[in-house]
């Protein structure tokens, strides 16, 4: 998730280059590429701290979760679009 004023952690964001329509999607199917990026992202904590999704009533993907109106969408709804979990614990 890239914010307008770029910070150093954002250079390491795994979602760099994804369309805003993906990162700010409200539906799991559209958000799937961003959710997959999050799984390998090294700056999830920084992302969540900067976005503060609950406080900002955020819509989109942040820190490995899909948010709508600042509430995390249940994983049962996003897991379907993420694919199966492999032996290494990574969704493929
Ligand atoms: S945690 Fe997800 S949304 Fe946040 S910077 Fe990383 S890949 Fe992007």
Image (cartoon, grey):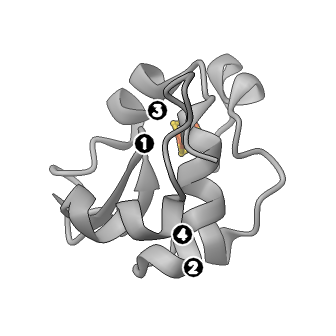
Neighbour tally class for label 4: few under 14, some 14-19, many 20 plus, Cα within 10 Å: many
Q: Is residue 55 left or right of residue 42?
A: left
User: Mark 3 and mark 2: span between their CA atoms?
Assistant: 20 Å
Q: Quadrant of residue 78?
A: bottom left
Residue at image position (41%, 38%) is 63
| Separation (CA) of disc 2 from disc 4 | 4 Å
Residue bearing the label numbered 2: 30
Q: Which residue is mark 3?
A: 47
Q: Residue furthest front?
A: 87
Could you say whether the residue bearing mark 2 is in a helix, strand or loop? helix
Q: Is residue 76 left or right of residue 26?
A: left
Q: Is residue 15 above or below residue 67?
A: above
**Disc nearer the start of the sequence (4/1):** 4
Few, some or many C-alpha atoms within 10 Å of disc 2 (few <14, some 14-19, many ≥20)?
Answer: some
Marks 2 and 1, how far apart in space? 14 Å
For mark 3, give the secondary structure.
helix
Residue 76 in the image: x percent, y percent?
23, 63
| Dot in front, 4 or 3 | 4
Seen at 16% across and 50% down, the residue is 55
Would you name the residue on which mark 4 appears? 31
Which residue corresponds to mark 1? 64
């Amino acid at each position: 998730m890239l914010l307008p004023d770029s910070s150093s952690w954002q250079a390491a964001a795994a979602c760099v280059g994804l369309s805003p329509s993906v990162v700010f999607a409200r539906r799991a199917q559209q958000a799937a590429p961003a959710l997959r990026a999050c799984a390998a992202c090294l700056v999830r904590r920084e992302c969540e701290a900067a976005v503060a999704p609950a406080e900002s009533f955020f819509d989109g993907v942040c820190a490995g979760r899909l948010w709508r109106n600042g509430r995390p969408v249940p994983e049962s709804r996003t897991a379907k679009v993420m694919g199966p979990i492999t032996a290494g614990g990574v969704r493929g």
